[in-house]
Image (cartoon, helix red, strand yellow):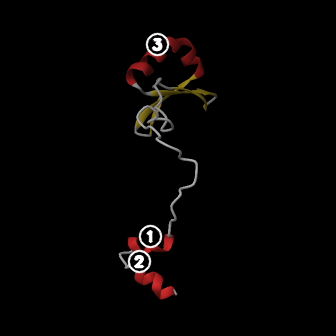
Amino acid sequence: MATHDDNQTDVRMIKASEFKTKCLKLMDEVADSGVEIVITKNGRPVSRLVPYRDEEPSMFGRDRDRIRILGDIISPLEMDWDEERELALIQGKDPDKSLRAKD
C-alpha cells in the first residue's frame, strides 16, 4: 500500500484483488477519513474511490431571489451619453475644456 501527496490529501493505492475482498470496509474508511483510494490492476491505476461531497452551488442564478428588475432593461436609454465627456471626468479633467480643444 503506497501513499503520495495529491492536493494536500493522502491517497492510498491498493490492488483490485484487495479492493474486491474489502470493498464495503474500504467504502466506510473513505467516507470517514476522506482519504481517496486508487485501485490498480497490474500496477496501473484504473479507478478511484473518493468520498462523496455535496457540490458547491453554481454562481449562476445565486441571487435570483434577492434581485428584482424594475422597468425595461432592454430598450435603449433616451438620454445621450457622451463617452468623451465621461472619460474626461474619470481622468479628473475639465470635460468642457477637453471638448473645446477638439473644436
Of badges 1 and 3, nearer the viewer stands 1
Q: Is residue 100 above or below residue 5?
A: below
Q: How far across and how far down the image is residue 58, in percent?
A: 49, 35
Query: Looking at the rendered structure, which numbered label has been put on residue 10?
Result: none
Tell me the distance, in whole angstroms, between the alpha carbons under discs 1 and 2: 8 Å
Residue that numbered label 1 is attached to? 86
Tell me the distance, in whole angstroms, between the alpha carbons under discs 1 and 3: 67 Å
Q: How far across and how far down the image is residue 11, in percent?
A: 46, 32
What residue type is disc 3 on?
Lys
Q: Is residue 83 above or below residue 3?
A: below
Please report whichever mark, 1 or 2, sits nearer to the chain's N-terminal start. 1
What residue type is disc 1 on?
Glu
User: Do the residues bearing badges 2 and 3 touch, measured as CB atoms within 8 Å?
Assistant: no
The residue depicted at 50 percent of the width and 70 percent of the height is 83
The residue depicted at 44 percent of the width and 70 percent of the height is 86
Q: How far across and how far down the image is residue 19, in percent?
A: 55, 18
Q: How far across and how far down the image is residue 17, in percent?
A: 59, 18
